Image: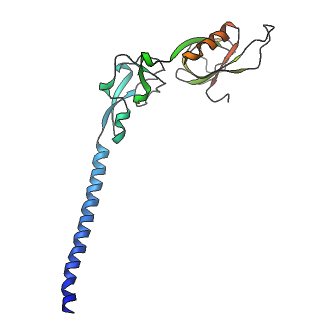
Amino acid sequence: MTSSRARRPFFGDLRFLIGLVLVVVSVAGVWLLISSSRQTTPVLQATHTVLPGETISSADFQVVEVGLAGLADAYLAPQDLQDDAVATRTLPKGELVPLSSIGDDAELRTTTVVVSSTAIPAGVGPGSAVELWHAPLLEDGRTPDAPRVLVGDAVIARVAEADGMLSQSRTDVEVVIDRADVADVLAAITGGSAISIIPAGAGS
């Protein structure tokens, strides 16, 4: 009986030490979490919409401090911006710039063409992702065939005229397209096709 009573303080102290260690570990974990969340990294943020194929410079961005933790290496830091850098996709105003959206002239696969569209939906403007549809002429040279997709992933670069409503007249629109689509677009233009611009996904 005496031996059993003698061991109780030891086990009591052991439980106390284990509890103390758990408290210390918990506090340390919370401190590390708060400390890491307060660490920020300077990255570039677009100050306006940047189009695919545009040459970019520091004038297109502002430096912001954000807490990205382990994701910091996926975004463009101020010191990483090169002189020959171009955007490989649309960068909307306010977006943090991913490294995957920046390339150089040698990697550029897009170009711009001007088309005369018979329909410009309201809200479509520079930076909008759109589809180009066309109605080629039949053999008689006067009757339009059924409309079909000409380019499925174009981006609006500039609209010569925009009134906020569906335009009833032909409007010149500069669009960014893949170089592989240039021949088809030029053939549609010279062949007299009626070209319409549809917000991406609306014609699916």
How many callouts does the rendering have?
0
Name the residue: 37% across, 32% down. 75
Q: Tell me the colour scheme of the image.
A: rainbow
Residue 151 point in image, percent of width and height: 62, 20
Name the residue: 22% across, 70% down. 17
- Along the line of sight, the residue nearer the viewer: 94 or 114: 114
Q: Is residue 79 above or below residue 195?
A: below
Figure quadrant of residue 25:
bottom left
Figure quadrant of residue 134:
top right
Q: Is residue 29 visible?
A: yes
Is residue 154 toward the left or the right of residue 53 in the image?
right
Residue 3 point in image, percent of width and height: 19, 89
Q: Is residue 64 above or below residue 51?
A: below
- Along the line of sight, the residue nearer the viewer: 84 or 66: 84
Q: Is residue 97 visible?
A: no
Q: Residue furthest bottom?
A: 1
Q: Is residue 162 above or below residue 202?
A: above
Figure quadrant of residue 107:
top left
Task: Assign the N terminus to one quadrant of the image.
Answer: bottom left
Residue 137 point in image, percent of width and height: 76, 11
Task: Assign the C terminus to one quadrant of the image.
Answer: top right
Is residue 75 toward the left or the right of residue 192 in the image?
left
Name the residue: 34% across, 34% down. 73
Residue 190 point in image, percent of width and height: 67, 6
